[in-house]
Amino acid sequence: MNKYKAQRTGDFPSRLEAAVYQLLYLRQKAGEISDIQRQVRCELTDAAIATKIDFSFVDVGSGSTIYCEAKGMATERWNLLKRLWAHYGPGKLEIWGGTYARPKLVDVIIPKDKK
């Protein structure tokens, strides 16, 4: 059993993360995105405060890298990282929530210098 009672599914620490990966995989097969990466390390300040984001991918239309996080439960640490991302993130961050049976895009954070 993982933290917060998440059930590990294959190579993924939660069923929600596995479901989000499946959505990204289908988008890649459709040609909308490319180069899906897992567990991407991102530094959020000049002081090298870093976090690992679940996924990154390249939007074929714009050529920009987009980051993606599956969150079943928000913690204090996650709320802090969201605020840091809004100021220092390397690019757009999609936050997916809901359940593994019905994942949904719940928020998009665009860092202020990327707007």
Image: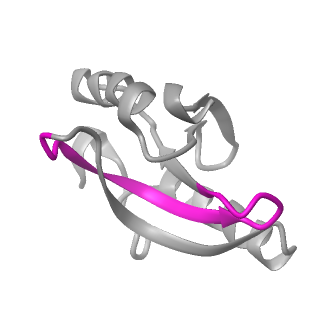
Nearer to the camera, 69 or 111: 111
Task: Examine the image and state in which quarter residue 44 appears.
Answer: top left
State the quadrant of the C terminus: top right
Tell me if I can see residue 31 in this picture: yes
Nearer to the camera, 92 or 8: 92
Is 81 left or right of 20, judged from the image as shown?
Answer: left
Tell me if I can see residue 111 in this picture: no
Residue furthest left as drawn: 47
Residue 49: percent from left, percent from top? 17, 42
Q: Residue at the spot x=71%, y=61% of the render?
A: 23
Q: How is the image coloured?
A: one colour
Q: Which contiguous range is marked in magenta?
A: 47-65
Q: Residue at the spot x=70%, y=43% of the render?
A: 102
Q: Is residue 61 magenta?
A: yes
Q: Is residue 115 magenta?
A: no
Residue 25: percent from left, percent from top? 69, 72
Q: Is residue 12 above or below residue 43?
A: below
Q: Is residue 91 above or below residue 84?
A: below
State the quadrant of the N terminus: bottom left
Is 60 left or right of 95, judged from the image as shown?
Answer: right
Q: Is residue 70 above or below residue 111?
A: below
